[in-house]
Image (cartoon, rainbow, N blue to C red):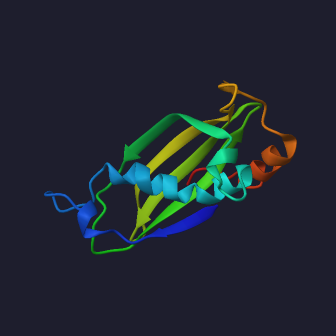
Amino acid sequence: MITTPVIPRVSETDGAGHVNNVFVPIWFEAGRREIFRILTPDLEFSRWRVALVNMNVDYEGQIYFQHNAEVRTWVERVGTKSFTVGEEVWQQGRRCARGTAVYVYFNYETQGSEPIPETTADGLRAHIHKST
């Protein structure tokens, strides 16, 4: 499992006194950085090989500005042309949000999906973890 610390910003806090829900998907994407490195080690967009095709978020508790948070990221499934990432936001020992993101291995020149190379699939499989 990959863990990414998050320090909430004042600008992410809304009038209800908690971190606004629109920021959780942004935090999830930050947690995927090391997954992206498996696919494109230098993170150079000219060699980018994935496209997001589905994302789901379940909000389970409020997240507050006053306390740091943690994004937990792992791979749930690796298929022939796509893979699923699991992710959660934790704060003060509570799971506040959970979600999934599905990516396809994608060729931007041909505008089509392609099979995930075996070495890349092995790198993704190294991060397979079950949801907590």
Q: Residue at x 73, y 54 (%)?
A: 38
In percent of width and height, residue 53 lies at: 54, 32
Q: Which residue is drawn at 50% across and 52% down?
A: 29
Residue 97 visible, this angle? no
In percent of width and height, residue 17 lies at: 17, 62
Residue 46 visible, this angle? yes
Q: Residue at x 44, y 63 (%)?
A: 90
Q: Residue at x 48, y 45 (%)?
A: 99
For the residue pair 121 and 114, the one nearer the viewer reads as 114
Q: For residue 16, which quarter of the picture?
A: bottom left
Q: Is residue 72 left or right of residue 107?
A: left
Q: Is residue 127 left or right of residue 29?
A: right
In percent of width and height, residue 87 lies at: 53, 52
For the residue pair 127 and 22, the one nearer the viewer reads as 22
Position of the C terminus, as image quadrant, is: bottom right
For the view shown, which residue lies furthest in the left direction? 15
